[in-house]
Image (cartoon, helix red, strand yellow):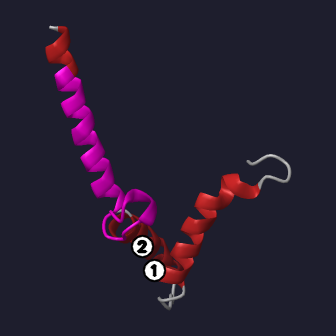
């Protein structure tokens, strides 16, 4: 929770919920609760994390950004091991 009169801690989650509503909830006419339960996780995992470009990540999907950073960390660790050996 953010401190009193400091709403900026919630900005990222508010942005996510706006995206979820605009790009999924308002675009799909759910007929049953079961559809909601199946569509929301699909949107988050398949669309938001794997396909949707995020400006804060250099216009890459989060999964791609994470994979690139993991590779860089592995390379950095291997270089450090070589230097310390």
Q: Which residue is mark 2?
A: 38
Left or right: 3 with respect to 31? right
The image position of residue 61, as x and y in percent, is 34, 63
CB contact under 8 Å: marks 2 and 1? yes
Circle 1 Cα neighbour tier, 10 Å, few/some/many (<14 / 14–19 / ≥20):
few
Question: What SS does tag 2 mark?
Answer: helix
Please identify the residue farthest to the right as the structure is shown: 4
Of residues 36 and 15, the one nearer the viewer is: 15
Of residues 46 and 37, the one nearer the viewer is: 46
Q: Which residue is mark 1?
A: 35
Give me the residue at 26% from left, 48% from top. Answer: 67
Disc 2 to disc 1, C-alpha distance: 5 Å
What residue span does the magenta drawing correspond to? 50-79
**Quarter that holds the C terminus:** top left
Residue 42: quarter of image = bottom left
Left or right: 17 with respect to 4? left
66 in relation to 48, above or below: above
Circle 2 Cα neighbour tier, 10 Å, few/some/many (<14 / 14–19 / ≥20):
few
């Amino acid at each position: 929770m953010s401190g009193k009169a400091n709403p900026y801690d919630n900005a990222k989650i508010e942005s996510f919920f706006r995206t979820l509503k605009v790009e999924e909830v308002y675009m799909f006419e759910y007929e049953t609760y079961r559809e909601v339960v199946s569509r929301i996780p699909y949107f988050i995992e398949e669309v938001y994390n794997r396909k949707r470009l995020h400006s804060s990540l250099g216009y890459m999907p989060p999964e791609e950004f994470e994979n690139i950073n993991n590779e860089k960390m592995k390379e950095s660790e291997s270089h450090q091991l070589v230097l310390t050996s």
